[in-house]
Amino acid sequence: MAHNTSESLVELRRVTFGYGERVILDDVSLSVPRGKVTALMGASGGGKTTIMRLIGGQNRAQTGQMLFDGQDVTTMDQPHLYAARRRMGMLFQFGALFADLSVFDNVAFPLREHTDLSEDMVYDIVLMKLNAVGLRGARDMMPNALSGGMARRVALARAIALDPELVMYDEPFSGIDPISVGTSAKLIRQLNDSMGLTSMFVSHEIEQTFAIADHVIILANGKVAAQGTPQEVLHSTDPLVYQYVNALSEGPVRFHYPAVTVEDDFGDVADPSSQQFGVSR
Amino acid sequence: MQRSKNDVWVGLFVLIGAVAILFLALQSANLLSLSFQSTYRISAKFENVGGLKPKAAVRSGGVVVGRVESLVFDDKSFQARVTLALESRYAFPKDSSLKILTNGLLGEQYIGIEAGAADTNLVAGDVIGATQSAVVLENLISQFLYSKAADGSGTGAEKK
Amino acid sequence: MTWYKPADVGFATRSKMADIGYAARLFFRLLVSFVPTFRRFGLVRDQMHFLGNYSLAIIAVSGLFVGFVFGLQGYYTLIRYGSSEALGLLVTLTLVRELGPVVTALLFAGRAGTSLTAEIGLMKAGEQISVMEMMAVDPIQRVLAPRFWGGVVVMPLLAAVFSATGVIGGWVVGVLMIGVDAGSFWSQIQGGVDVWQDVGNGILKSIVFGLTVTFIAVYQGFEAQATPEGVASATTRTVVVASLAVLGLDFILTAMMFTI
């Protein structure tokens, strides 16, 4: 297995993916630079989480290549796919901790499944990971006793237990209080730099995202609308991107859902006799 | 585990296998009367059919050669008319006789057919005349008691 | 789907067959996982505890009650023919050949089957299955297989407990309460029940039922929609499908084993 030292750890080349007739990704090409924090943004249902699932091999692209460290994930058989997945860590939106295991056992799970390390070593590694996310004291708690933010941090500790090369975060800032948002952002940046990871996350939080990301990709209508550093994207001239980063309600994405004209629904407003309630002409 | 394109064919294969197992199970338990033999119909009249039921066996020499199709009461002759379906591969002479016999002592009843000596064979629609009705247990016992009583009074009379 | 449009009917048939095919492949995969699963016996042992120990109370008590009823009904029927000493034989044969495996399987489907389906369905809804896949751990090997084999091992044992408590229940009612002769109760059993023919076939039946019920429970959980309604309907489907399957298989197995 040749170790690719190119600039990008993950590369999508002309990838198309959809469910039945609905096309989510249409001939998309993008790359995730090694060692940097990359943010994926865009309208809901635009394909951001889909890209992460494609990288992890949970879905297969219909056309194109999904390269992880130079190898195409779409054509891998199960042993190779599992070997590739051991080099990735994924953080699901709500943590997805194993409900019947304690925090300690959750973080120890990948170590116990994939390595032959002694329990002493596992103990040390688990506590180190928990310490990195600030939850070393919560090691014996059960997942149902944790708050949303804490659960996500435990899931993060579990995701980095095997020291992966790529860590993917699915909406790490959504649904938690501002303090936890700040903590999560800090952790993503810190872990990326201290562990030499490549990080990728999906988010809608413009401020925090632009503060910690090195590279931003905005998806719209199944294509890449903008790619570049946060500054480049902020000053992009694309109307879709402009509407998105400035959070405007009117732009290429319209406020009103498509409907018949106002006259058809309400009648001619100036002439009361022409108004027929419930009848559209 | 991913869905595969071959799933439909695997499903079809499983269904066929299940039907095959069902068929084998029922066949081995003799619960299926799937005989693909062609049959010809014969009828006969009996005084008393006893416990004979439709689908009862018609045996000759112990081997099943046909089945009882139906039992009807003929109110012209006040007898039971039995229709038999005999397998076409077995031919019986025209003067064969029928008896209603019992499997074991208290078992199911079946029709025994005994071949006669005629030159021509039975064909579909023939009526067999030589029939022996079922043995009715109560008649047998009363016969026995009556004959016992007759013997007793006979010897008694002799002694006197 | 509309039942009168051929295209809809054809599509529905095809998708049902695809479901059956998928289920068959999963079943085969679970069967083949026998050796790797028992190598990590700790997981199977835990599942045997959840499925077996926690079902023991309901199985034993049900067996006792069924034995009581059998003692009563059996006595009332046999006494008409003057064969009341055959009560022990009647109760034991019926339990060991039929009621033990079947009723145990039905109770197991209701108690342990539903808990399996709900557990796996909720794991799927909480994305725990996906996260396991992303951690390169095969969820079928890690989650489904121990539960499957745990159920298969536990079922014959539970059926035996049911039959045993049933016989004791029959004894309590027949001998202690009604007054059937104790000696003939037990000696008729000794004479009439054959270990290989009756007890052995009963065990074989309960193994087949164990394979069926546990597989259906595990499959429904694995394929449940990841929503609360999805998990709920999967749970009811487990009970319905497993019960029908058990009763249908019982007929086929009895035809193969017990008729001449």
Image: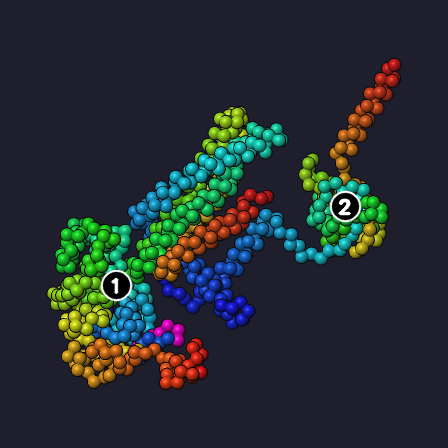
> Which image quarter: residue A186?
bottom left
Give me the residue at 41% from left, 54% from top: C235
> Could you tell me residue A135's position as x and y percent?
15, 55
* Badge 1 amino acid: Phe
- The residue most toward the front is A272
* Badge 2 amino acid: Ile
Give me the residue at 69% from left, 35% from top: B105
Q: Is residue B65 visible?
A: no
Mark sitting on residue B113:
2
Q: Is residue A121 left or right of residue C134?
A: left
Residue B112 to residue A48: above or below: above
> Could you tell me residue A268's position as x and y percent?
39, 84
Give me the residue at 78% from left, 33% from top: B139
Q: Secondary structure at mark 1?
A: loop
* Total labels drawn: 2
Main SS, magenta residues: strand
Kindly indicate whether the residues beneath marks 1 and 2 are on one polypeptide chain.
no
1 or 2: mark nearer the eye? 1
Q: Which residues are magenta?
A: A13-21
Q: Which residue is mark 1?
A: A92
Q: Is residue A17 magenta?
A: yes
Task: Tell which of B95 and B51 is nearer to you.
Answer: B51
Residue A188 to residue A139: above or below: below
Residue A70 to residue A130: above or below: below
Q: Is residue C149 magenta?
A: no
Mark 2, chain letter? B
Task: Tell which of A87 and B91 is nearer to you.
Answer: A87
